[in-house]
Image (cartoon, rainbow, N blue to C red):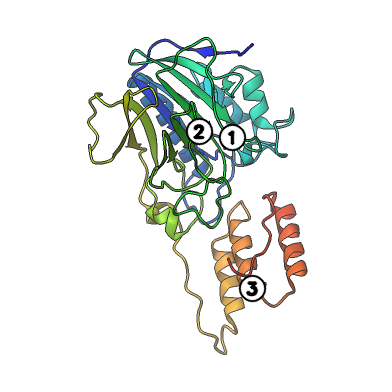
Amino acid sequence: MTERSTSTDVRGLLFIGDPHLEARIPGFRKDDYPQVALNKFRWCLRFARENQLQPILLGDLFQLPQDNPNWLLSAIIESIDEPLPAIYGNHDVRENSLKPHDSIHILFAGGHLKRISAESPWTGTVSGRQTVVGGTAWGDRIPKEFVADSVTADVVVWVTHHDILIPGYEESGQVRPGELPGIDLVVNGHIHRRLQPVSKGGTHWVTAGNITRRARSDASREHIPAVPCLLPADSTSADDASDAFAFKSQGGDSWQIRWVTVPHEPFDAVFHPEVESEEPDEEHGSGFIADLRQLTARRTDSGAGLNEFLKKHLDQFDAPVADEIMRLAAEVTSEQPDNYNRDS
């Protein structure tokens, strides 16, 4: 029998993409990232509560799957007023499935997070409309269709954490969007940028983007942390009406996705500037030495700077040797290994 998580009537749904909470400062961030990221997560929950929206987590609550400090777990627990519907992402689990040693397992077991799936969807009413939200966590297959049993849904939403082949993410996308009978809207986490919605028949695919910027990159510089909200088309909002995506459910109801900006500082206020490599000269030697000096100056708690430095100078090694260097670096810094790619 399908287990359902029910809720009282809400005005809409709010989707939280990839908080990546951790106790360390990632590469090149110069602010207090642990508190900044936690405050963004708290802001999303508070905004949802104040505006009668049901928050739903799209995965990657944590940056590291295990060994997160007790203070961080306690802060997350204290921030969640009632069970938060959620799926887990690739950073939440050491393997491709949930295990007892994963930090997020504690939150599911304690009832702070409510895992949603095809067998255990969230159900409730959104402005009086019967709504079903199913989910597919990292490592699981997205269903080809969904048939709601014992309930007539006005709209069916599916939350995922996958490499979706969306325009703007062709380099890594693996799952091709298509029409999924019985599913009106797919909201995907995992991809750290907001991309244009893709419609395939009666199914509409939305990429949420993450609420925290971890990497110093051009994509991160352009990214505006925001949360997409699902509302009936006739809902009033103070947001810019041009920043909305309208669609009809397979049942014929009109809906809209509206993005709400999460408060954040300018890119240059949170990331150290990139130091241009100096031309080789007698004083500084080579670009290798210049980059090493930058790495030392910008050293942080995580291995992001080291990984960037290594990738930049691994062309001198054969690919198997380069991959082993990256593996050893990941082992030292506790980061997930990232194979060296000469074309990256």
Kindly tell me whether residue 57 is visible in this rendering: no
SS under mark 3: loop
Residue at 71% x, 59% y: name it: 329
Residue 142's label in the rendered image is 1
Residue at 56% x, 23% y: name it: 77
> Residue 150 appears at what percent x and percent y?
53, 9
Disc 2 target residue? 180
> Residue 243 appears at what percent x and percent y?
28, 41
Mark with earlier residue (1, 2):
1
Kindly indicate whether the residue at mark 2 contacts the one at mark 1 (C-beta within 8 angstroms).
yes
Q: Amino acid at mark 3?
A: His
Please state if 313 lies on the left or on the right of 160 as rendered: right
Mark with earlier residue (3, 2):
2
In depth, the one of 111 and 274 nearer the eye is: 111
SS under mark 2: loop
Q: Amino acid at mark 1?
A: Ile
Instruction: Please tell me in which quadrant of the rendered image residue 104 appears.
Output: top right
> Residue 309 appears at what percent x and percent y?
61, 67
Residue 313's label in the rendered image is 3
> Residue 20 appears at what percent x and percent y?
54, 40
* Badge nearest the viewer, 3 or 1: 1
How far separated are the C-alphas under marks 3 and 2?
A: 45 Å
Mark with earlier residue (3, 1):
1
Please state if 80 lies on the left or on the right of 306 as rendered: left
In depth, the one of 250 and 191 nearer the eye is: 250
* Badge nearest the viewer, 3 or 2: 2
Which part of the image, by quadrant, shows the C terminus?
bottom right
* Badge nearest the viewer, 1 or 2: 2
